[in-house]
Amino acid sequence: MQEIFDRYINYLEAERNASPYTVRNYTTDLMGFFDFLRGREIASLKAVDKHVLRDYLLHLMEQGIVKTSIARKLSAIRSFYRYLVREEILSVSPVATTSSPKLDRRLPSFLTTGEIVRLLEAPDVATPQGQRDRAFLELLYASGLRVSELVSLNREQVNLDTREIRVWGKGSKERMVLMGEPAAAALTAYLNQGRLELLGKRGTNALFLNRYGGRLTERSVQSILQEYANLAGIGKRVHPHMLRHTFATHLLDGGADLRVVQELLGHASLSSTQIYTHVSQSQAKKVYLSAHPMAKEGENELKNE
């Protein structure tokens, strides 16, 4: 079993070009599944059938594992068994007829226009770190970049003249993202001054640098972002993906076409982007109830009953 697993991980890395994050998650999830099989004294992958898988899902539920995590674990197992069928180690996958638990789809959180303005104005642009932070905050909001895409950017991927950035997203898919004038201005200021000071005599083509001149990490971006959110008086947890949600929601609120937003976000499926239409509709309802005279009148009548 271990030898087959090692070959599968090599396949993910070499042929599927899976990210280290995906490989790590699949490894953890599959090891947990193998531990379950050993506990049931199931020594062969061929002995796994739909009944064993249902027992495993029940076992996870009894442990209090949330539905999203169970779905992810089942996805890892499904991918592994597809590989076994592909390599003709098995003739059929027992996971093919096992359904993932139905997920409660939550609307993504986003910042209001007022909150995003306060956040963008929080960094002290008189310092190199402040210039860097203002630049990457502007860029996250202006372009909808994933934080992994942001920190992996190199200087040559950015074209300030056309205000375009060439990005390699999930699955190494290439796309072009755009930025507005404020983001381009913040990035220009950072490149002309802040980045040079952070870089010193070191040599790197990384766009966003830490105080030692190395590439800024995802964890650092998360930590810095939350600090500025607190400074800006935003009373909630703010993470980089929230700026991506905010980018998409504000575009749709402004009348952008759904397929354009899909292209800018780098979503493979339109269904992934459609969640933002629900957010936009939800926001529209709140605005309507708070602004329309008859809507407010109706609410007051309900309260008085």
Image: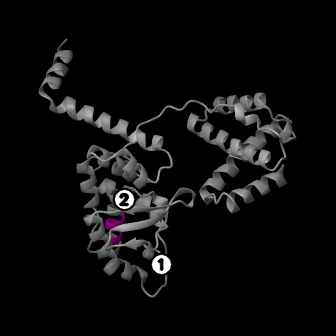
- Asked whether 261 or 61 is in front, the reply is 261
Magenta highlight on residue 3: no
How far apart are the two marked residues, 1 and 2, measured between alpha carbons?
A: 21 Å
| Direction from residue 275 to residue 294 in the image, left or right | left
What is the total number of numbered labels drawn onto the structure image? 2
| Direction from residue 173 to residue 166 in the image, left or right | left
Residue 38 in the image, given as x and y percentages of width and height: 83, 40
Residue 273 in the image, given as x and y percentages of width and height: 43, 44
For label 1, the crowd category at 10 Å Cα-Cα, with few meaning under 14, some 14 to 19 and many 20 or more, is: some
What numbered label is drawn on residue 205?
Answer: 1
Q: Amino acid at mark 1?
A: Asn
Q: Amino acid at mark 2?
A: Ser
Residue 255 in the image, given as x and y percentages of width and height: 27, 45
Residue at screen point 66% across, 57% down: 16
| Direction from residue 285 to residue 133 in the image, left or right | right
What numbered label is drawn on residue 143?
Answer: 2
Residue at screen point 48% across, 85% down: 202
Residue at screen point 68% across, 60% down: 13
Residue range of the region highlighted in magenta in the rendering: 131-136
* Whether label 1 touches label 2, CB < 8 Å: no
Can residue 35 be seen here? The reply is yes
- Asked whether 2 or 283 is in front, the reply is 283
- Asked whether 42 or 287 is in front, the reply is 287
Can residue 235 be seen here? The reply is no
Quadrant of res 98: top right
Residue at screen point 62% across, 33% down: 100
